[in-house]
Image (tube, rainbow, N blue to C red):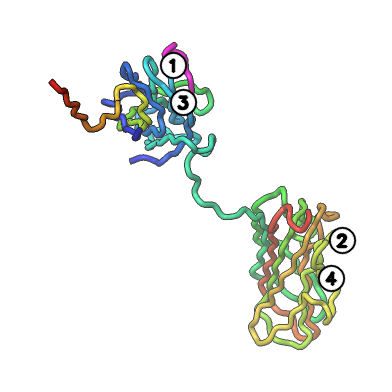
């Protein structure tokens, strides 16, 4: 278990197809990526705005008079 | 719509990428990852980087806290956290610069007035922009004040043997003193004098006030003592001063 660090991220950014989330380690002065760092247990909690999730209500039986 | 956690599969060397699945559109609220720096080439700052569909960096959220070489960190990125907030800082005590001089043994010549000679005293100055050590120049004025502020000084000396008329003065902090002024003269009427109540009591005095400007010559913080009768005695002495605030009392 390592040191606990909290950092800020932007409030209103929506990302989708073709976007990549990268967990990186950067040098404190040069900003270049630092090698030799391993990333584990990564996760992202997000508001899922994908269109595939549709609210489905109770079925309505429509009678047909034949 | 309810929030959803996306667990990034696997693990890997930083920069560790998670390409969003086709059709997925999300508004990230929290991101978290563990960084194992046991093999790091240098110290580093954890960074959450978003690369757009054009292949360009859209945003980098860089933590404020540097992770040392060989160390690890569990990092969380939050929305609504002020930029630059970084890691929650450890609670810290208010910073009040102070200076002290302490002398375990000093021969107090009796009777009569005398200023404590601080030659050889132990000193502790926490901020030299506020206080400086003046013992080498004038051993009776051991601390000079170099900045405006509201100050509180304390002095003690002892142990003492009770003798009527024993008096003790923290001499004035300088002619610019705006608050309480301890007069450098010795008088029973001075509010900052103290007569010990019984054998063995140390004398302790407080003196404070505002210095709206840097006092002339660094002030005159001295400890002046007087005993009207009795033989020379060996005592210990302490003098300290603290700046309570740099901008109080209208400064």
Q: Residue at x 48, y 25 (%)?
A: B60
Q: Which of the labelled discs sits on residue B183, or is there none?
A: 4
Q: Position of residue A17 (x, y in %)?
A: 37, 16
Q: Earlier in the sequence, mark 4 or mark 1?
A: 1
Q: Are discs 4 and 3 located on one and the same chain? A: no
Q: Which of the chains bears the disc numbered 1?
A: B
Whether tag 2 and tag 3 are in contact, CB under 8 A, the answer is no
- Please say if the residues under marks 3 and 1 sit with CB atoms less than 8 Å apart: no
Residue identified by numbered label 1 = B52
Q: Where the C terminus of chain A falls, by quadrant?
A: top left
Label 4: chain?
B
Proximity of marks 2 and 1: CB atoms separated by less than 8 Å: no
Left or right: where B112 falls relative to A12: right
- Tell which residue pokes out farthest to the top in this image: B54
Measuring from the top left, give residue B59's x and y in whole percent.
48, 23
Comparing B179 with B57, the one in front is: B57
For the residues labelled 2 and 1, the Cα–Cα distance comes to 66 Å
Q: Is residue B57 magenta?
A: yes
Mark positioned earlier in the residue sequence (4 or 2): 2
Which dot, 4 or 3, sits closer to the camera? 3
Q: Quadrant of residue B139?
A: bottom right
Q: Is residue B10 above or below residue B141?
A: above
Where does the magenta region start and end? B53-60
Binning the other alpha carbons within 10 Å of mark 2 as few (below 14), some (14 to 19) or many (20 upward) gives few
Which label lies toward us, 2 or 3? Answer: 3
Helix, strand or loop status at disc 2: loop
Mark 2 sits on what residue? B175
Q: Are marks 4 and 2 in contact (CB under 8 Å)?
A: no
User: What's the mark number on residue A13?
Assistant: 3
């Amino acid at each position: 278990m390592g040191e606990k660090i909290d950092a800020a991220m932007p409030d209103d950014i929506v990302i989708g197809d073709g976007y990549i989330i990268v967990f990186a380690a950067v040098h404190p002065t040069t900003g270049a990526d630092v090698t030799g760092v391993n990333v584990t247990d990564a996760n992202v909690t997000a508001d899922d705005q994908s269109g595939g999730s549709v609210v489905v209500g109770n079925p309505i039986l429509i009678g047909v008079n034949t | 719509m309810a929030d959803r956690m996306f667990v990034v599969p696997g693990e890997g060397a930083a920069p560790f990428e998670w390409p969003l699945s086709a059709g997925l559109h999300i508004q990230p609220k929290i991101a978290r990852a563990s960084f194992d720096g046991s093999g790091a080439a240098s110290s580093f700052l954890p960074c959450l980087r978003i690369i757009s569909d054009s292949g360009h960096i859209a945003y980098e959220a860089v933590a404020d806290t540097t992770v040392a070489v060989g160390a690890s960190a569990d990092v969380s990125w939050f929305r609504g956290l002020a930029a630059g907030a970084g890691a929650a800082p450890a609670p810290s005590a208010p910073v009040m610069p102070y200076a002290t001089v302490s002398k375990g043994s000093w021969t107090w010549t009796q009777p009569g007035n005398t200023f404590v000679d601080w030659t050889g005293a132990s000193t502790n100055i926490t901020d030299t922009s506020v206080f400086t050590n003046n013992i080498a120049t004038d051993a009776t004025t051991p601390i000079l004040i170099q900045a405006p502020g509201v100050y509180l000084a304390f002095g003690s000396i002892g142990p003492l043997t009770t003798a009527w008329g024993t008096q003790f003065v923290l001499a004035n902090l300088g002619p610019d003193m705006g608050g309480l002024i301890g007069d450098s003269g010795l008088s029973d009427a001075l509010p900052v004098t103290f007569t010990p109540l019984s054998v063995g009591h140390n004398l302790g005095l407080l003196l404070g006030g505002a210095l709206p400007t840097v006092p002339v010559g660094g002030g005159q913080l001295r400890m002046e003592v007087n005993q009207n009768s009795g033989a020379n005695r060996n005592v210990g002495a302490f003098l300290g001063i603290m700046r309570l605030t740099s901008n109080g009392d209208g400064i």
